[in-house]
Image (cartoon, rainbow, N blue to C red):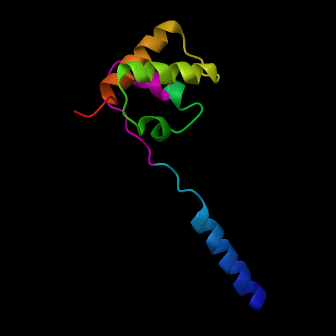
């Protein structure tokens, strides 16, 4: 009986310590929405990237960094993705 209680306690501690899944983000409509969703979610949850707010220059640097880590984004897609992110996830006014 004692082993059962210890095992149950251990399982409850493990499940409490497990990270909770990120809330899905509903992207605003606009040119680039599908591209951002497809390109960015291949490696991480959108909530990871879009939980921050950056200006266009910083979004461009972030997307460049993701490309250096293996994201496949063409030059034309780069401009669309950065514009969408800056417009919809830029600094709060």
Q: Residue furthest left?
A: 93
Tell me if 91 is positioned left or right of 57 in this view: left
Q: How many marks?
A: 0
Q: Name the spot of residue 52 as percent of width and height, x first.
A: 40, 37
Does residue 12 appear to the left or right of 86 in the view shown? right
Which residue appears farthest toward the bottom when viewing the image?
1
> In front: 70, or 29?
70
Q: Is residue 30 above or below residue 28?
A: above
Is residue 62 in the magenta section? Answer: no
Q: Is residue 62 visible?
A: yes
Whether residue 28 is in magenta: the answer is: yes
Where does residue 20 sit, x and y in percent of width and height? Answer: 53, 56
Which quarter of the figure is the C terminus placed in? top left
**Residue 12 figure quarter:** bottom right
Q: Position of residue 38 (x, y in %)?
A: 51, 26
Q: Which region shows up in magenta?
A: 23-37
Quadrant showing the N terminus: bottom right
Above or below for 74 versus 6 = above
- Relative placement, left or right, of 2 versus 75 is right
Up the image or down, 28 lies above or below 8; here it is above
Foreground: 52 or 26? 52
The spot of residue 30 in percent (x, y) is 32, 22
Give the residue drawn at x 68%, y 79%.
8
Q: Which SS type dominates the magenta stretch?
A: loop
Q: What is the quadrant of residue 2 in the picture?
A: bottom right
Q: Residue furthest top?
A: 76
Residue 29 showing in the rendered view: no
Residue at image location 52% in from the left, 28% down from the top:
40
Residue shown at 46% from the left, 25% from the top: 36
Q: Is residue 84 left or right of residue 75?
A: left
Q: Residue at x 57, y 24 (%)?
A: 66
């Amino acid at each position: 009986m004692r082993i059962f209680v210890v095992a149950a306690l251990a399982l409850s501690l493990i499940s409490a310590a497990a990270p909770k899944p990120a809330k899905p983000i509903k992207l605003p409509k606009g040119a680039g929405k599908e591209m951002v969703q497809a390109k960015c979610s291949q490696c991480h949850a959108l909530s990871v990237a879009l939980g921050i707010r950056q200006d266009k220059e910083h979004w461009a640097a972030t997307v460049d960094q993701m490309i250096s880590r293996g994201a496949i984004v063409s030059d034309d897609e780069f401009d669309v993705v950065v514009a969408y992110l800056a417009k919809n996830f830029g600094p709060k006014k």
